[in-house]
């Protein structure tokens, strides 16, 4: 009986499911093929290698984050929502943060998110290098919090810690803006 033809969308859905269940360290093309009811060779017709599979999976999960209207809410509300949405995404896909430290999957979905976060920082009044630094500060804090959770450091107050730290960062950013002549 002939097998159903694979496509990239099926591969991406399967790899995200596999990564969610077993983590990035357990990913193999053979295991992915098995999950798809195909051989590893069949998967290779659609993707170059395991690294590309990780990039495609990362791109898919980054695109889960909805980009919020920057005009309808203030910059602080937009940054807070985006940071919380990023944190929630890392909880749904616990393989992403550790994979980023080893494989650096920087896909278009992540660039889309970071560009929008930077636009929120620019809406606050930051320009150029400062907007980039503000964006990186928020991202680094959220990733650091998520990394701690994935290393077993999560506590019942993690959400409170995230909110507190984000508030401190935003207060500091606002202070920089307010201190301008």
Image (spheres, rainbow, N blue to C red):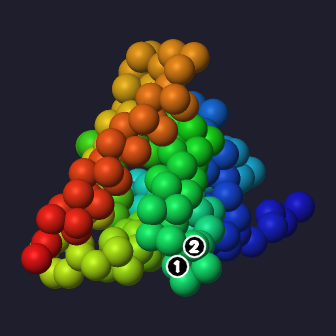
Measuring from the top left, give residue 60's x and y in whole percent: 57, 64
Residue at mark 1: 70
Measuring from the top left, give residue 135's x and y in whole percent: 29, 63
Q: How many marks?
A: 2
Residue at disc 2, secondary structure: loop
Q: Which mark is residue 90?
A: none
Q: Splitting the image into 4 quarters, where does residue 168 fall?
A: top left
Left or right: 167, with 14 as reference point? left
**Quarter of the picture holding the C terminus:** bottom left
Left or right: 178, with 114 as reference point? left
Measuring from the top left, give residue 123's x and y in whole percent: 38, 80
> Looking at the image, which residue is at 70% across and 64% down?
10
Whole-angstrom CA distance, mark 1 to mark 2, is: 6 Å
**16 and 41: which is toward the camera:** 16
- Asked if residue 160 is positioned above or below residue 176 in the image, the reply reads above
> Looking at the image, which residue is at 27% across and 43% down?
101
Residue at disc 1, secondary structure: loop
Q: Splitting the image into 4 quarters, where does residue 106 fall?
A: bottom left
CB under 8 Å between discs 1 and 2: yes
Q: Splitting the image into 4 quarters, where does residue 156 fall?
A: top right
**113 and 162: which is toward the camera:** 162
Q: Is residue 123 visible?
A: yes
Q: Which mark is residue 73?
A: 2
- Asked if residue 85 is positioned above or below residue 67 in the image, the reply reads above
């Amino acid at each position: 009986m002939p097998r159903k033809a694979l496509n990239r969308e099926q591969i991406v859905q399967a790899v995200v499911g596999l990564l969610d269940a077993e983590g990035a360290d357990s990913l193999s093309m053979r295991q992915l093929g098995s999950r798809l009811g195909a051989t590893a060779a069949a998967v290779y017709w659609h993707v170059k290698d395991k690294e590309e599979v990780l990039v495609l999976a990362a791109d898919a999960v980054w695109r889960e984050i909805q980009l919020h209207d920057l005009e309808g809410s203030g910059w602080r509300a937009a940054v807070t929502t985006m940071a919380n949405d990023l944190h929630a995404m890392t909880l749904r896909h616990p393989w992403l943060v550790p994979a980023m430290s080893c494989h650096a999957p920087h896909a278009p979905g992540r660039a889309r998110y970071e560009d929008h976060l930077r636009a929120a920082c620019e809406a606050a009044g930051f320009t150029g290098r400062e907007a980039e630094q503000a964006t990186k500060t928020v991202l680094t804090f959220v990733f650091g919090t998520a990394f701690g959770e994935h290393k077993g450091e999560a506590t019942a107050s993690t959400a409170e810690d995230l909110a507190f730290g984000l508030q401190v960062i935003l207060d500091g950013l606002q202070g920089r803006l307010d201190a301008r002549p």
